[in-house]
Amino acid sequence: MTRSIRGFTLIEVVVAAGLLSIVGLAIVAFVTAFARGAGARARISDPALEGALLVERLRAVAPALRAPLASDGETAALWLSDSVPSRTVHLSELGWLRFDPTMGDIVLERVADTHFAEDRGLETEFEADDDFLAIREDSARDGLLVSTILAEGLDSARFVGDGRRGADDLALELEAERATARVAIGPVVPEEPLR
Amino acid sequence: MRSAMISTNGRPDRRAHRGSAILLALVAVGVATLLGLSLAATRDANVAASRNLAHAAAARAAAAGAMEVAVDVLEDPSTDLAAISKSGGVLFEGLAVGGASAKARVHDLLTGLAADDSSEVVEIVVEGTSSGISQTARAVGRLPRAPGAPTADLDCSEFALLATGTLVFEGDACLAVWSGSPLAILAEPVAYGLASGSTAQIAVSPDASLHGTVALSIGGFATDAEMHDEHLADKMVRIPAAIHVPLAAVPIERAAESLGGGAADTLLDGYIAYDAMPEGDMRVPARAAATLRGVRSFDIAGNLRIERGAQLRVEGETRFVVRGNLVIEPATVEVAAGATLSFIVLGDASIDGAYVGGERSNPEELRDATGRAAYDGGASRVLLSLAGGGRVSISEGSVVKGEIYAPEAAVAVATRSAVYGRVLGRDVRLGAGCAVFYDPALDDRSGWTARASGIWTPTGAVRTEVRQIARLDGESLERFAVETGVVPEVSPSLGSLTLLAIEDADDDTRSDAGAAGSGTSRPRERASVRIARGILRAIEAQRANGHGVFSDVGELDRAFVSLGFDPMKGADE
């Protein structure tokens, strides 16, 4: 027998087995991490998280949010504050939450403050039974609205209210990646953090 | 090289390849390990976001809870605000709320500094922190008054527009809050009306903008929040009785001996550091620049005319007594920080195309009648008081940041002019395109609309002594204080006017009144001391007789307004 047909030594086998183990473990870690990363990326659009963040952002934008006023499923009119002290709704106090299906965003639209400064007559006081959704259409047509994105990466969203707790009872149902979530927009806890 | 790896029989030498497989394997292992570890270290965004939300919720709850504690502490009359001021405004720190901690600070809304015992309106800032994530809650409100002498705001400065005769809003006239005021954040309604409480003599154009305002009417005080909201929805502020508006203080008669010593006509130009008492007119010539320094007093027998293009700068406490007419042409009158300017006019006052107010911090502001002018010390720096039944005309795009107190005069704001402050007159007319933007800092909640003020008796009637104040002069106020034990409060500029009569009584000689360089501080000090002593005597007498001192602020005045939460900090959103 010549040296060329001699088998592996025990040490070579042990070293090879060790290397294979290490490589195997690395491959397993790689595949696992990749899978987790893909899952995490998918869950960025988790509707529950987006809903919670939406509420946080809405509270930041409108800390004195008073009540939802109207909704047609796609758009909801909100009374953001009583900054014109009157206990009645004024144009400068109105906001509209709306789902933008092309971008997958939920935006809050308001009439820009600059317009009120430029035109004192723009400020308007409304009655409780006014059509607050039509007011949005008029404002959009006049180019008065500015938008703030409150949630993104959604497949669909719609406003629902069961009507059992009054007209200001409003919730938002969000859907993304075949998962759904529901967050309450109203009734609003008044004057948080003062209770 | 190649020859070295070929054996002599022409076949590759296996020994030459020994070890290369291990090297390749090691490289592969290294690469795979790095890849695996780097990807394994990738954080799961979902877990991170959920954790952030959980900690944010804990921090938010801590901030909300601590805010309640802070409000309770501030509403406790025994709270030592002076001590809080010494600690930089920190109310408490390290307060454990669940697993989070909270810190509360309080600062004066007007000054921006740490709140002290002179603060009336404060902002509470509470920061809750949980695992590095913090949420900040804010609330603003008026502090309850410490136990002590009750006060009465007698100059009706809580009203943006108050008329004793008629009140007219023409065209698109506007009445609103001065948005640049630090206290605008309180979102309190702006009050206007007739002293009688009647609305019959108020003419409001359909195009007038009166959003966020309430009209004075006669009725019962709001006793709870619900009634307060009802009144607000009705755009009314109700008080049980008509308002008594004292007339403006009348300046003392010019001493006969001083008449001969005064100059006939006087020009104000350059730096002025002396008083003057001209027998004729006083002028700031066209395009001149005059600076008034120190405590200055000018008693002008004729007219005061600030001519076109002139610039008058006031750096101290300055008072013009104008026994003729005041005319301000397109000119600039600016009052520096810490200074005040008072015009006491016995004739008419005309301001055409001029700026009169605090020194403008924004050089591009010019005459901003839109309501967005910078605060620059507010309206309390300038007072225009008409002691007679003359006429005040503010026109041609004029901007006045100050108070106009003319209970016997007709006041007209016309041709796109604006007053930042307040206007009180007999007949007040706000023209089309004109506006009054009220400075809420003028309202210290001790006036006619405050149930707990010294104007009202505990049974809800007007003190008879209030209606006996004919003029806002020192003698009347002192008598009121002595008889009632109530501290009379007037605007700072009006306060200096109230001393005129006392100066007259205390210092009959007043030999230096018209002399250049004479000061007015000594008689003023004497008058202040005299008023203060009278008030203290009255309060001590009340206490000795077993009468409690009522200074409790009503529940409605005590409420703080939430500003909500700031965006959370420290979160990996």
Image: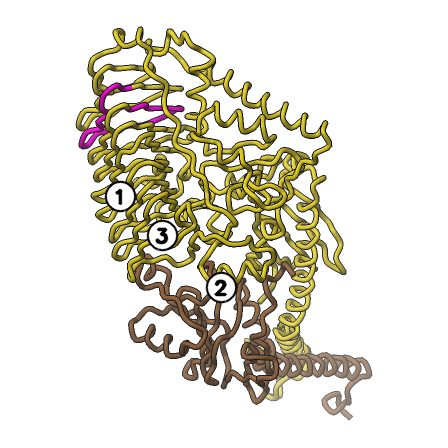
Chain colours: A brown, B yellow
Q: Give the range drawn in magenta.
A: B300-322
**Magenta span contains residue B305:** yes
Which residue corresponds to the image point at 30% horizontal and 51% vertical from the top-left? B168
- Which residue in the structure is indicated by mark 1? B412
Q: How far apart are marks 1 and 2 (CA)?
A: 31 Å
Q: What residue type is labelled 2?
A: Arg
Residue A182 x %, y %: 59, 82
Question: Which residue was labeled with disc 2?
Answer: A87
Vertical order, A139 against B309 (above or below)? below
Q: How crowded is mark 1: few (under 14 residues within 10 Å), some or many (20 or more)?
A: many
Q: Mark 3 lies on which chain?
A: B
Q: Is residue B393 left or right of residue A128?
A: left
In the figure, B452 relative to A77: above or below? Answer: above
- Quadrant of image for the N terminus of chain B: bottom right
Nearest to the observer: residue B305 or residue A36: B305
In which quarter of the view is residue A190 placed?
bottom right
Tell which tag, 1 or 2, sits nearer the viewer.
1
Q: Which residue is drawn at 25% across and 7% down?
A: B260
Instruction: Tell me the kind of residue under disc 3.
Output: Leu
Helix, strand or loop at label 3? It is strand
Say which residue label 3 marks: B175
